[in-house]
Amino acid sequence: MMAERRLLVLFGSQTGTAQDTAERIGREAKRRHLQCRVEALDSCDVANLIHEPLVVFVCATTGQGDPPDNMKMFWRFLFRKNLPAGSLCQLDYAVLGLGDSSYPKFNFVAKKLHKRLLQLGGNPLLPVALGDDQHDLGPDAVVDPWLVALWDKILALYPLPPGLEIISPNVCLPPKYTLRYLPEDSPQPESDLLQPTAPRAAPCELHPFAARVVSNQRVTAPSHFQDVRLIEFDIAGSGITFSAGDVVMIQPQNCPEDVQQFCQLLRLEPHRRFVLEPTEPGTSLPPLLPQPCTIQYLVTHYLDISCVPRRSFFELLAYFSTNELEREKLQEFSSAQGQEELYSYCNRPRRTTLEALWDFPHTTCAIPADYLLDLIPRIRPRAFSIASSMLARPERMQILVAVVCYKTRLSKPRRGLCSTWLASLNPEQGDVRVPLWVKKGGMKFPADPATPVIMIGPGTGVAPFRAAIQERVALGCRGGEGLCPAPHPGEWETGVGAAEQWECSCLPGWECQGDASSGG
């Protein structure tokens, strides 16, 4: 009796590269008629690993050798000391790491995971693969040949059933979901994802809190090259708590002009309503999309049309092309040999997905709406250091945002999606809401406020230090000589805890720098 041909692909991804690679493996598995699930490591019930015959792990390494956020629970479980040595003896596995060799702990997570799976009795199909961003061809220089070897091993263990052949790369696989349009006269849903009601539990990525924007002010001089904003949110009733060094995650959205352009290019009707239906049983729906949904909501809040497109984008796009010249170029960009050309076209000038679609007009207008979620990744949340203390302002949260804007060889300046959107929000024009939640930060300040601290923030900016100083002032501590980290005098209200003796956030003996000190 033939063994069940089942493959589980698990990924730990911070920026989306590992997820994109995992989904590529999933597509290649389907071409080989394997039952395949692709999931984030923390979405998988790790205790069920003992029942899995074949697993491919795709893991990025973040920071100083840390696992990505969506595999941290898995990581803690796997390294429990009470796990029996032979608990994974039935598991055939392979580990693919994605990292950057300019960092000291290059691919640390993949190496450590491989070693731990061996300790637990797992059977490696191949040596761990270590993709490197620093390579001229990027991680694909390692990934491409490793995958060829992987499929050889898997097909030796699980041969194709009689009468079946590998589905040709020239054949487009079905989409993950289909969009079933609703009649235009169907009733409108009453719910809204951004209801400002208090959540039942602490806000998280799947259930963010819609915080009201209280103020949005520029704190650098108009003549200064860097536009830095001090943005304040009302978090009353949210259940959010934070301390100095913590991070707020913000879910941004595309600007209306880009959304309109995208819909025009693809000939989509923004106000058409649809429900998503999985093409395969067992496929879960995207948790952040309401059902039913409008095209406008999908493009505004979900599809990352401003990200730099990856190789897989051009690979899928080539299937829809009816224009020979465009198809040849798309196929070149998706080939192993065309990666240098793709880097020059996309990565070096930071060309966006929307701009790439403009460059292939005949193909773009032929894209079936069903493939939108396969073609374009979701908008990822952005992290900001919190720049205020709950001790000073219990129901408020502040962030300092440097608005990202720079030039490349493209005529239009490159703009950061989240910082540009945040800078555009004007609370004077009505009830402006931002979906957010808080994560523990990696920066810890001494529990004893009397402990002297030297604060050096290359890359972090002043935000976490500003929060720490507000915290210490609220606890009644006094600082020594130095520069005031406050964006401007008079920013802290008088009468809040121990800060009431000062007119502004400056500490006694500090020289207030006003606008000039806030750039970070």
Image (cartoon, rainbow, N blue to C red):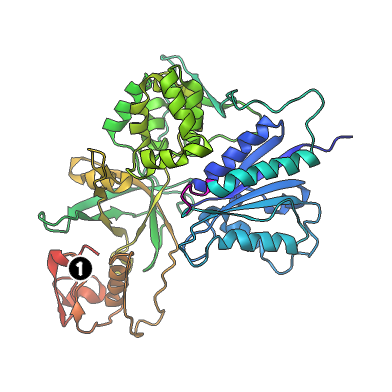
Residue at the extreme front of the image, as rendered:
337
Q: Quadrant where the N terminus lies?
A: top right
Q: Position of 493 compared to 23: left or right?
A: left
Q: Residue at x 41, y 38 (%)?
A: 341
**The residue under label 1 is which amino acid type?**
Ala
Task: Determine if the magenta segment contains residue 139.
Answer: yes
Q: Which residue bears the numbered disc 1? A: 486
By secondary structure, the bulk of the magenta-drawn segment is best described as loop
Task: Determine if the magenta segment contains residue 332.
Answer: no
Q: Position of 294 compared to 177: left or right?
A: left
In the foreground, 69 or 449: 69
Task: Find residue 45 and report its horizontal and vertical position in percent.
Answer: 67, 50
Q: Is residue 382 above or below residue 315?
A: below
In the foreground, 404 or 254: 404
Secondary structure category for the residue under label 1: loop
Q: Residue at x 43, y 17 (%)?
A: 323
Task: Find residue 207 and report its horizontal and vertical position in percent.
Answer: 46, 46
Q: Residue at x 47, y 40 (%)?
A: 339
Circle count: 1
Q: Is residue 328 above or below residue 497?
A: above
Q: Position of 19 compared to 92: left or right?
A: left
Is any part of residue 53 visible from this angle? yes
- The quadrant holding residue 305 is top left
Q: Residue at x 71, y 30 (%)?
A: 33
Is any part of residue 187 visible from this angle? no
Q: Which residues are magenta?
A: 135-140
